[in-house]
Image (cartoon, rainbow, N blue to C red):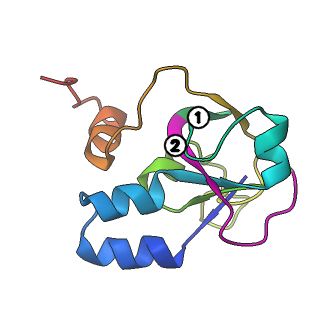
Amino acid sequence: MITQRSIEEGVAMEKGKTTPEYFEACSIIEMHDDDVRTLGLVPNQLVKVTSECGTVIVKVVKGRQSLYPGLAFIPQGVWANQIVPPRTQATGEPQYSGFPVTVEPANGERRKSALELVQGAVGMWRGDQ
């Protein structure tokens, strides 16, 4: 798994992190076509991505960049932050690239908004009221 800035994320961020544009630009996972097929997934399907430190629900999209089989990409942002390991490798930055994840169908779960994820991370989210 890797995460980094993307053009789509940067453009959407200018409009605001609670906008539909930001949600669609960042709550995604780009994967190689072979991996999507091997996992029995289809484009635009919701999946659960799990790392050693968390899980997040995102939408599978065709890779916009060249991705090798076995490599997945989530744009930097609230969704990626749910699964990025806190290790810094003595750099002062979390390990944004090169960490293992599992990807599986979300089975009825939904993508959460940026606000839900941030509030949930600090224990403030009270659910859909």
Q: In the rendered structure, which amino acid carries the disc numbered 2?
A: Val
**Residue with the mark numbered 2:** 58
Looking at the rendered structure, the secondary structure element under dot 1 is: strand
Q: Residue at x 65, y 69 (%)?
A: 64
**Residue with the mark numbered 1:** 47
Residue 22 pos. (x, y %): 35, 62
Task: Please tell me whether residue 87 is drawn above or below residue 48 in the rendered image.
Answer: below
- Residue 64 within the magenta-colored segment of the rendering: yes
Q: Is residue 123 left or right of residue 83?
A: left
Looking at the rendered structure, the secondary structure element under dot 2 is: strand
Q: Residue furthest front?
A: 42
Q: Nearer the viewer, residue 72 or 123?
A: 72
Q: Quadrant of residue 41?
A: top right
Q: Residue at x 47, y 20 (%)?
A: 108
Locate the C terminus and report the quarter of the image it occupies: top left
The span picked out in magenta is 56-69
Q: Nearer the viewer, residue 44 or 95?
A: 44
Q: Quadrant of residue 50?
A: top right
CB-based contact (under 8 Å), mark 2 and mark 1 = yes
The answer to which of marks 2 and 1 sits earlier in the sequence is 1
Task: Please tell me whether residue 45 is drawn above or below residue 99 in the rendered image.
Answer: above
Residue 63 pos. (x, y %): 69, 63
